[in-house]
């Protein structure tokens, strides 16, 4: 994320002109923008003239500059765009005022946001700005007969490729080099800045040696990590052990994986943890919250007034921060966020037990 200009607009709202530089930045913006915010952007709109109406042509698409009062935001993950919808409150064409419009924000599109930013939203944008310097990371996990490649994004991990080739003895077994070649080819095509190669036993080291010999341009980008399995389980172990942190200066995914493990361990031991909106709000009221954990999509729903929590989540967040606690907003698209959602979407690691 690149922030090119800061200022203030009407009613003390902060104005930020920024450029999302990758799909991660679009994902961050999806969790910052809320109904009632103002968004300014260049866009195109199909505009009907009088002669178009007579001929029922549907009008011609023209470039215009609009300010929307936001009513809906959608992160179209697979289209790599952010859809911001709302009513046009200012426009380079006055005849389009008060019409409903959707701005499609893509990578490298400049937009201006005017809103009252909440502390966690400001922190999210700051993290996105700092993350622009982080290298792209791929996690390759390999075991006998199977290999997987995952990319690490700020919104989670995604499987990029998987290969299965029976190795060892038997009629249908294939040489291990074929599996390693498929893995090396995928990593070469992905061209990540750094690769973490993980898995059980000696297979990963054999794969490492093969790739170093056959794909020499990848050699200095690869580091190895021991895990008990390949695939999704192996990826989780890599994140939990902080291997990604050694490559990226900061990754929210690794932090979330460690926090959810600490939370679930404390819950299992009946120790310093609580979950669910009412219990967390009570813990915050007593000043017992050390780290507040909340899922981003649930936080957004509650802030929009569409949720069913009987607490004011903004008051809980402000209370925790006033008393020196940390607030971590989890991605719903990654496994720790899914685990937190199953616990009600909000939980807390406590300074001391309440009961």
Image (spheres, grey):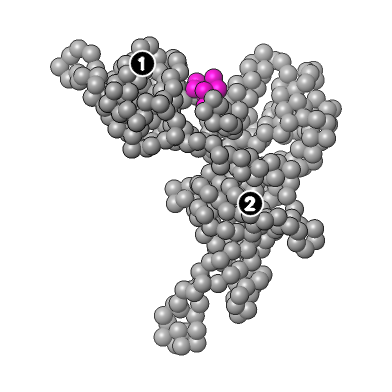
- Against 181, is 79 above or below? below
Residue of label 2: 3
Residue appearing at x 76%, y 38% in the figure = 317
Query: What segment is highlighted magenta in the picture?
Result: 237-244
Mark 2 residue crowding within 10 angstroms, few (<14) / some (14–19) / many (20+): some
Residue 147 position in % (x across, y down): 34, 25
Confirm whether the magenta stretch covers residue 239.
yes
Q: Residue at x 38, y 37 (%)?
A: 191
**Residue 241 position within the rendered picture, expressed as x and y whole percent measured from the top left:** 54, 19
The tag earlier along the polypeptide, 2 or 1, is 2
Residue at the spot of label 1: 205
Instruction: Examine the rendering and report whether any part of residue 236 can be seen.
Output: yes
Instruction: Out of 250 and 68, give the one closest to the viewer.
Output: 250
Q: Residue at x 65, y 48 (%)?
A: 32
Q: Is residue 82 left or right of residue 123?
A: left
The residue lying toward the viewer, choosing from 167 and 283, is 167
| Relative to 129, 205 lies left or right | left
Q: Secondary structure at mark 1?
A: helix
Check disc 1: other Cα within 10 Å, few if <14, some if 14-19, many if 20+: some
Residues 16 and 233: in front is 16
Dominant secondary-structure state across the stretch colored magenta: helix
Does residue 269 sit above or below 20 in this rendering?
Answer: above
Q: Position of residue 142 (x, y in %)?
A: 36, 21
- Give how far apart the Cα atoms at labels 2 and 1 are: 43 Å
């Amino acid at each position: 994320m690149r922030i090119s200009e800061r200022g203030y607009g009407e009613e003390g709202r902060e104005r930020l002109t920024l450029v999302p530089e990758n799909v991660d930045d679009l994902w961050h913006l999806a969790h910052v923008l809320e109904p009632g915010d103002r968004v300014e952007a260049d866009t195109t709109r199909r505009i009907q003239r009088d002669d178009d109406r007579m001929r029922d042509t549907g009008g011609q698409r023209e470039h215009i500059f609009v300010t929307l009062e936001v009513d809906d935001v959608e992160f179209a993950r697979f289209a790599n765009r952010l859809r911001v919808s709302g009513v046009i409150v200012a426009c380079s064409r006055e005849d389009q005022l008060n019409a409903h419009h959707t701005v499609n924000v893509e990578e490298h599109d400049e937009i201006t946001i005017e809103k009252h930013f909440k502390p966690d939203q400001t922190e999210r944008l700051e993290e996105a700005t700092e993350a622009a310097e982080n290298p792209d990371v791929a996690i390759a996990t390999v075991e006998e007969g199977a290999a997987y490649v995952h990319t690490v994004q700020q919104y989670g991990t995604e499987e990029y490729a998987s290969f299965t080739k029976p190795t060892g003895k038997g009629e249908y077994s294939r040489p291990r080099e074929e599996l390693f070649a498929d893995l090396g080819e995928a990593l070469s095509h992905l061209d990540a800045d750094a690769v973490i190669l993980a898995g059980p036993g000696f297979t990963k080291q054999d794969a490492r040696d093969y790739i170093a010999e056959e794909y020499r341009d990848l050699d200095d980008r690869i580091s190895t990590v021991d895990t008990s399995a390949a695939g999704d389980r192996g990826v989780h172990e890599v994140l939990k052990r902080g291997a990604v942190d050694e490559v990226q200066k900061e990754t929210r995914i690794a932090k979330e994986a460690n926090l959810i493990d600490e939370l679930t361990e404390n819950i299992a031991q009946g120790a310093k943890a609580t979950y669910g909106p009412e219990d967390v709000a009570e813990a915050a009221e007593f000043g017992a919250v050390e780290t507040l954990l909340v899922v981003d999509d649930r936080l957004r729903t509650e802030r929009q007034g569409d949720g069913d929590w009987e607490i004011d989540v903004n008051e809980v967040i402000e209370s925790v921060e006033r008393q020196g606690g940390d607030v971590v907003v989890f991605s719903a698209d990654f496994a720790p966020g899914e685990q937190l959602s199953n616990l009600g979407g909000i939980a807390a690691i406590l300074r001391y037990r309440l009961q």
